Amino acid sequence: MPVTKKQLSGKRVVFGVGGSIAAYKAILLLRRLTDLGADVEVVMTTSACEFITPLTFQTLSGHPVHTNTFNPDDNMAHLRLAENADLILVSPATANLIGRFAQGMADDLLSTIILASHAPLLVVPAMDGGMWQHPLVQQNVKTLRETGVEILDPEFGSLASGHIGWGRFPSEEAIMSSIISLLTMPGDYHDEVVLITAGPTHEAIDPVRYIANRSSGKMGYALAQAAQKRGAQMVLVTGPTSLTPPPGIHTISVTTAEEMRDAVHKHFERATVVIMAAAVADYRPDQPAKTKLKKQGREQVSLALSPTPDILTSLSAQKSGQFMVGFAAETEHLIEEATRKLKAKGLDMIVANDVTKPGAGFGSDTNAAVVLDAHGLVADLPLMPKREMATKLLDLIRIRLNQQK
Ligand code: C5P
């Protein structure tokens, strides 16, 4: 009988197991992974060994289980595991593990492997709902997500503590589907140089005040990270945001619309895809004051504004095959406005969102949008996490790039 290749054949997974009662579920996941042909090496934390014995994982994985950084028989295990992994999975991940990863600690074998590896990292948290919602845990989760770590959200349901609430360990199906999508992620942007803008711009009124908007930069950063994972060579031009520059991405920080235009023009020629997700100020104060403006009693004051350069329009004039995508944040007449901007700015595609809709506005972690091109509506994307929307937008762009070839 011919041997059929399994879905995860040839894929190497480092499977980190933390000290939670959900450690027993790691056994079932390990079975699923090996059944699909993955080569899995298990790394257990000291507290994980309190819940399950390493022998169980050793038997199922067919490899010795790693529990100690200082193993005289395999003292380079951390580097070997880090370099060879196609994916590092940490499941279950305790609040303690998430905190240590977020701090960049390397005080045991699992955390050392994570720092030494460039492989995608998938973290499946397991803790009581109250702990998960603690601001410090949420801060650590945010830090990790901003550096490109995939973290599954706990689900709602009955908890090991007997309570009902958020904090339930994600279903095996949800975990497996994330693992499979990370391990089979298409490298379909390998040949592309993708230039993305993100965030707002700040236009000075005087040395202490500026005009800005509510853009957080999250959509642009999510697009940059998604394109990087699919093999793109990335340039991210970012206005002022509170986000951490994604590791491995060439990131240029700018403040004003003019600085953004200059940075974008500098990299435009070698780009094959340009995605302008930044909310660039349309106007800037005419003559920013050199010194702080004094309060004028109760009198009204007015500020003279001049238009900023429209970056997309100036790029379109120099276009030499780049696929150009713009964004349109609207509060009314979404389709009409987006269609007008698509034409006026010479775009190949536009992503329009109604920022008055709950969850689709600036600053949120989710977005809902319609995507249009010269032929009309391409896709109507319902409310979803910005990371997911980034993937869907890159899929749509990829289809069009393939058609152009
Ligand atoms: O005209 P409006 O600002 O609504 O257009 C939005 C799109 O145009 C976004 O993709 C934004 O990044 C881009 N834009 C630009 N230069 C500006 C203003 C906006 O390229 N000065």
Image (cartoon, helix red, strand yellow):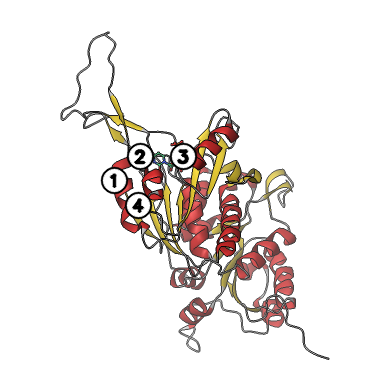
Report x, y in % for residue 352: 56, 40
Direction from residue 383 to residue 292 in the image, left or right: left
Q: CA distance from mark 1 to mark 3?
A: 22 Å
Report x, y in % for residue 40: 63, 78
Tell whether circle 4 marks a residue whose Cβ is less than 8 angstroms from ligand 1: no
Q: Name the residue type under label 3.
A: Ala
Direction from residue 116 to residue 170 in the image, left or right: right
Question: Which circle's residue, 2 or 4, is located before the other in the chain?
Answer: 2
Question: Which circle's residue, 1 or 2, is located before the other in the chain?
Answer: 2
Question: Which circle's residue, 1 or 3, is located before the other in the chain?
Answer: 1
Tell whether circle 1 marks a residue whose Cβ is less than 8 angstroms from ligand 1: no
Q: Name the residue type under label 2.
A: Thr
The image shows residue 43, relative to residue 265, as above or below, that is below
Tell whether circle 3 marks a residue whose Cβ is less than 8 angstroms from ligand 1: no
Q: Which residue is mark 4?
A: 264
Name the outermost residue toward the right. Answer: 1
Circle on res. 118: none
How packed is label 3: few (under 14 Cα within 10 Å), some, or many (20 or more)? Answer: few
Q: CA distance from mark 2 to mark 4?
A: 14 Å
Circles 1 and 2, Cβ within 8 Å, touching? The answer is yes
Q: Which residue is mark 2?
A: 201
Please, what secondary structure does the residue beneath circle 1 have? helix
Q: CA distance from mark 3 to mark 4?
A: 19 Å
Report x, y in % for residue 220: 47, 49
Q: Mark 1 against mark 3, which lies toward the viewer? A: 3
